[in-house]
């Protein structure tokens, strides 16, 4: 019978974070943005424990706890109480990061706590001081201890044994921060417990903090029935950049099919002048790697990317894996599509809706590897033309394992690639898409409008396990979604939803026309726009004096100035206000060096007043000392003290306070 060596490790480590499904998927982080690391660490009896995190480039094989890989860093975990340990680390560089949690019995720390308890009880601690001195002497003999630390340990042992020094001073000498660091550094790690390694995917800047603007190039410079082009659309880029956006997102720019082309307002019969839906991809002019001839050429697209970059914008493309009946793949690869009993290809539908102009692809077909490879190659084609951001249309209607495979394939060549999942579906599916690699996700924000709805949803997104992998992107509207709040609330509703989206999430987006408060639905009770730009040209007068562009630019400017606070979803907190029409939340850095307090009037039809109850302790502000609340929108400074403060917001003038809290 084989002999099994006992496990002599005393420390148990559980609930390590950030992790996803016990390490089955990568957690998410962003380069340069602090990431919270935590675990529950404990041992039997009354043993004290210490814990630390170590991290760096993933290794093929584990390293013993007593050694640190040359390229790795380590940091002690703070112990706020109980068995929970936590700290913040800042990843650097894009790609995979591995981290481990290490725990060990803290013999010196336990001895010091017991010593102080015995002294407070009036007991003789002479022998206990000798125990502490022996701990220091023994530690000095460990082979891994540096010469300087060895000398410090022997010096401390001498001080603890010095009979001519009062006991209180000897204990004080053992209690300094310098000694605590010495003991952490020289701890015997031979029987330490290691949990991990756990993998984290570290993204670049725009993955964790970005403002998106969606535009249809064919509407820019259009003179119906003649549409605009990529060249005319490029003229709009400086104005988009001036509003503070980072990403300009284009719906599909590919050739549009003519078979069953949709007409204005999604009618099934198109006229000669109808431009069709960009999501009906493919014609004789090409498919997913071609540009609609009406928009221009691939060279024109390259010019658009260059112009965007010159304006400080990054181009995002729509990645819609579906085809019009005229797509080249229909003739070249009919096996990639589902067929009906009569042999015809099944068109898309969401009963009772029918989309005869679109054929969905069958990702489980007999040549699924060929189809999967073709989809991957489409992404790589646009990556080669300088695109790194893809808004993915309806990813939840394709196999989830396909996305896991495709995103991994793209990241091998382009680790800076960003994928935004447009999946308004069941929460568990949206969450799994984030787990398999989607960088950002559309959310239910559009349908969260009351105070209770917003508070619950903000809380869900900012707490584990979601916060470790689900990176929300709040959209005020889309070409498909015009919520009743915007239809009925007028310009005030547009202003308040702007503030909620832009300050509620690190990434947010809006569809063009929002700045002009376009709010007419195709029919009562519908979220579709009248004269939807999905089916027709929509040139606009961007110079209108009632445009919200100045406010949008101001809010985006505030976001950028407080980027470190707004980037931190884990520190998002909802605070109490005694009026259900007022919603209050804060954004802050982990060390509270930058704190924003946002108070929004959710009633677009009238002024509201109320009294806040702010969790000042969580924001690092003393309740007994006055502090400044500087409104970043109006440049007005209020002097507040304590958690209770009166606010009054009239949506016709100012729908929200965006307050920078500053100590005086």
Image (cartoon, grey):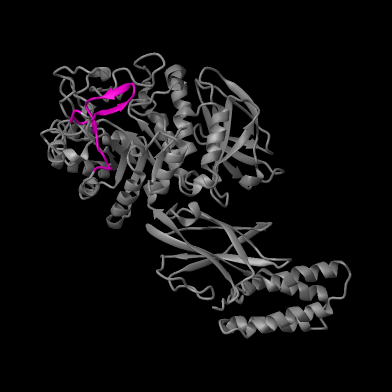
Left or right: residue 547 versus residue 315 is right
- Identify the main secondary structure in magenta: loop
**Residue 353: in magenta span:** yes
| Observer able to see residue 343 | yes
Residue 154 seen from this side: no
> Which of the 4 image quadrants contains residue 133?
bottom right
Left or right of 93 in this view: 568: right
Depth check, front residue: 315 or 44: 44
Q: Is residue 155 above or below residue 241?
A: below
Please name whichever residue, 162 or 202, is drawn nearer the observer in this view of the structure.
202
Residue 98 in the image: x percent, y percent? 45, 62
Q: Tell me where residue 645 sits by quadrant.
A: top right
Q: Quadrant where the N terminus lies?
A: bottom right
Q: How many marks?
A: 0
Asked whether residue 621 is drawn in magenta, I would say: no
Q: Name the quadrant containing residue 39.
A: bottom right
* Residue 333, x across and y down, in percent: 16, 41
The residue most toward the top is 524
Magenta-tinted stretch? 342-365
Question: Going 34% across and 39% down the picture, which residue do you hit?
Answer: 395
Quadrant of the image containing the C terminus: top right
């Amino acid at each position: 019978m084989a002999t099994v060596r006992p496990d002599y490790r005393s420390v148990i480590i559980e609930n390590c974070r950030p992790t996803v499904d016990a390490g089955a998927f990568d957690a998410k982080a962003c380069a340069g943005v602090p990431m919270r690391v935590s675990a529950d660490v404990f041992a039997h009896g009354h043993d004290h424990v210490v814990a630390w995190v170590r991290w760096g480039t993933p290794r093929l094989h584990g390293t013993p706890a007593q050694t640190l890989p040359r390229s790795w860093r380590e940091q002690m975990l703070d112990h706020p109480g109980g068995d929970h340990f936590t700290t913040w680390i800042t990843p650097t560089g894009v790609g995979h990061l591995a981290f481990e949690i290490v725990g060990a019995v803290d013999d010196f720390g336990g001895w010091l706590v017991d010593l102080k308890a015995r002294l407070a009880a009036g007991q003789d601690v002479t022998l206990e001081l000798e125990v502490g001195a022996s701990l220091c002497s023994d530690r000095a003999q460990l082979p891994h201890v540096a010469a300087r630390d060895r000398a410090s340990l022997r010096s401390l042992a001498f001080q603890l044994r010095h009979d001519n020094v009062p006991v209180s001073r000897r204990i004080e000498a053992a209690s300094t921060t310098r000694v605590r660091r010495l003991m952490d550094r020289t701890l015997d790690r031979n029987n330490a417990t290691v949990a991990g390694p756990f993998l984290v995917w570290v993204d670049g800047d725009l993955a964790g903090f970005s403002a998106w603007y969606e535009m249809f190039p064919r509407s820019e410079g259009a003179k119906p029935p003649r549409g605009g082009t990529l060249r005319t659309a490029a003229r709009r880029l400086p104005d988009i950049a001036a509003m503070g956006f980072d990403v300009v997102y284009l719906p599909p720019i590919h050739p549009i099919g003519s078979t069953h082309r949709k007409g204005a307002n999604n009618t099934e019969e198109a006229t000669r002048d109808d431009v069709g839906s960009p999501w009906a991809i493919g014609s004789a002019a090409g498919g997913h790697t071609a540009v609609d001839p009406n928009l221009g050429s691939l060279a024109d697209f390259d010019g658009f990317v260059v112009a965007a970059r010159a304006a400080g914008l990054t181009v995002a493309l729509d990645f819609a894996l579906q085809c019009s009946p005229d797509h080249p793949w229909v003739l070249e690869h009919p096996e990639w599509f589902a067929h009906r009993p009569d042999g015809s290809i099944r068109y898309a539908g969401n009963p009772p809706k029918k989309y005869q102009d679109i054929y969905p692809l069958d990702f489980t077909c007999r040549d699924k590897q060929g189809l999967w490879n073709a989809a991957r190659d489409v992404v790589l084609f646009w990556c080669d033309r300088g695109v790194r951001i893809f808004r993915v249309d309806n990813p939840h209607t394709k196999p989830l394992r396909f996305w896991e495979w495709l995103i991994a394939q793209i990241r091998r060549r382009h680790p800076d690639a960003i994928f935004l999942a447009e999946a308004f579906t069941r929460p568990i599916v949206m969450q799994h898409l984030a787990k398999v690699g989607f960088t950002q996700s559309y959310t239910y924000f559009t349908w969260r409008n009351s105070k209770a709805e917003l508070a619950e949803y903000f809380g869900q997104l900012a707490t584990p396990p979601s916060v470790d992998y689900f990176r929300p992107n709040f959209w005020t509207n889309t070409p498909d979604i015009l919520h009743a709040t915007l239809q009925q609330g007028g310009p005030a509703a547009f202003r308040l939803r702007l503030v909620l989206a832009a300050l509620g999430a690190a990434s947010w987006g809006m569809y063009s026309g929002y700045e002009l408060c376009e709010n007419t639905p195709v029919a009562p009770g519908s979220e579709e726009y009248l004269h939807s730009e999905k089916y027709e040209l929509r040139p606009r007068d961007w110079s209108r004096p009632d445009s919200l562009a100045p406010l949008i630019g101001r809010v985006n400017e505030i976001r950028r100035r407080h980027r470190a606070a707004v980037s931190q979803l884990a520190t998002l907190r909802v605070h109490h206000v005694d009026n259900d029409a007022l919603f209050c939340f804060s954004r802050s850095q982990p060390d509270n060096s930058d704190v924003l307090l946002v108070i929004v009037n959710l009633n677009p039809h009238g002024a509201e007043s109320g009294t806040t109850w702010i969790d000042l302790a969580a924001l690092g502000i003393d309740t007994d000392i006055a502090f400044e609340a500087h409104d970043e929108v109006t440049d007005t400074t209020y002097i507040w003290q304590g958690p209770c403060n009166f606010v009054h917001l009239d949506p016709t003038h100012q729908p929200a306070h965006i307050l920078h809290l500053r100590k005086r």
